[in-house]
Amino acid sequence: MRDSTAQDLLRIVVLISGSGTNLQAMIDQIHQGDSPARIVAVISNKAEAYGLKRAQQAGIPAKVLSHRDYASREEYDAALQRLIDGYQPDLLVLAGFMRILTDDFVRHYQGRMINIHPSLLPRHKGLNTHQRALEAGDAEHGCSVHYVTPELDGGPVILQASVPVEASDTPESLAQKVHAQEHRIYPRVIEWIARGRVRLEEDTVLFDNQPINDQPRRATPD
Ligand code: GRF
């Protein structure tokens, strides 16, 4: 049973591996005001992840579960699942968690796990997306928030934001522009989920009860 004071809140566990600027955007935007969402724990597979400090500064429990302490991916994911489920989350948020997840883990959280990927999916799944967008001569690039399914970076997209690619752009400048957009759209999606506006049914994302799979929403530019 959930704590009665927290009953109406969407309980969120955030997984990180690094700097945690997306986590910070969530803390800044969701933990202020009257949001019906609360981050109840932040878990990192790396002890040195700066995002752990961000969590502590916000008074959020911050835990480390190192993958180096486990012999296999299956054992690590099983331990991670036990740790996460101890917090009884409604939503699991991947925010720069740099691990491939086992199918069992993904299935356990299907429909309640989201990720942000630095490209306009389905373009540029995987790593080095900014470099690859430049090499491909893309006129626009961006980021996507999507539900996580067993197909890596292949789950149904909820919201995207785009940035124009300029002739002078480098992977670093693009990363900076895309990151700024990530900080806008990730908290927004969480807020929608907390307010019951977005959900996954089977493989279909519903926004205000309307399927949006064929046409993921694009955030309007600033
Ligand atoms: C972001 O670029 C996100 O798209 C990717 O990992 C990075 C995390 O950055 N999944 P940060 O740790 O939130 O700063």
Image: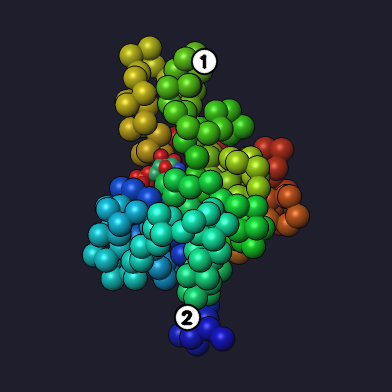
Note whether ligand 1 is within 8 Å of mark 2: no
Q: Looking at the image, is 21 positioned above or below residue 220? A: below
Residue that carries the numbered disc 1 in the rendered image: 136
Point out the image quarter for the N terminus.
bottom right
Q: Earlier in the sequence, mark 1 or mark 2?
A: 2
* Disc 1 secondary structure class: loop
Under mark 2, the amino acid is: Ala
Q: Quadrant of residue 77?
A: bottom right
Seen at 43% across and 55% down, the residue is: 67
Quadrant holding the C terminus: top left
Residue at (65% x, 42% y) in the render? 151
Question: Residue 86, relative to residue 91: is it above or below?
Answer: below
Q: Residues within 10 Å of mark 1 (few under 14, many from 20)?
A: few
Displayed quadrant of residue 171: top left
Q: Tell whether 176 sits left or right of 149.
A: left
Residue 122 can be seen in this image: yes
Residue 36 higher or lower than 163, as above or below: below
In screen coordinates, is 61 left or right of 122? Answer: left
Query: Residue 86: horizontal and vertical position, in percent?
Result: 49, 75
Query: On residue 6, which mark appears?
Result: 2
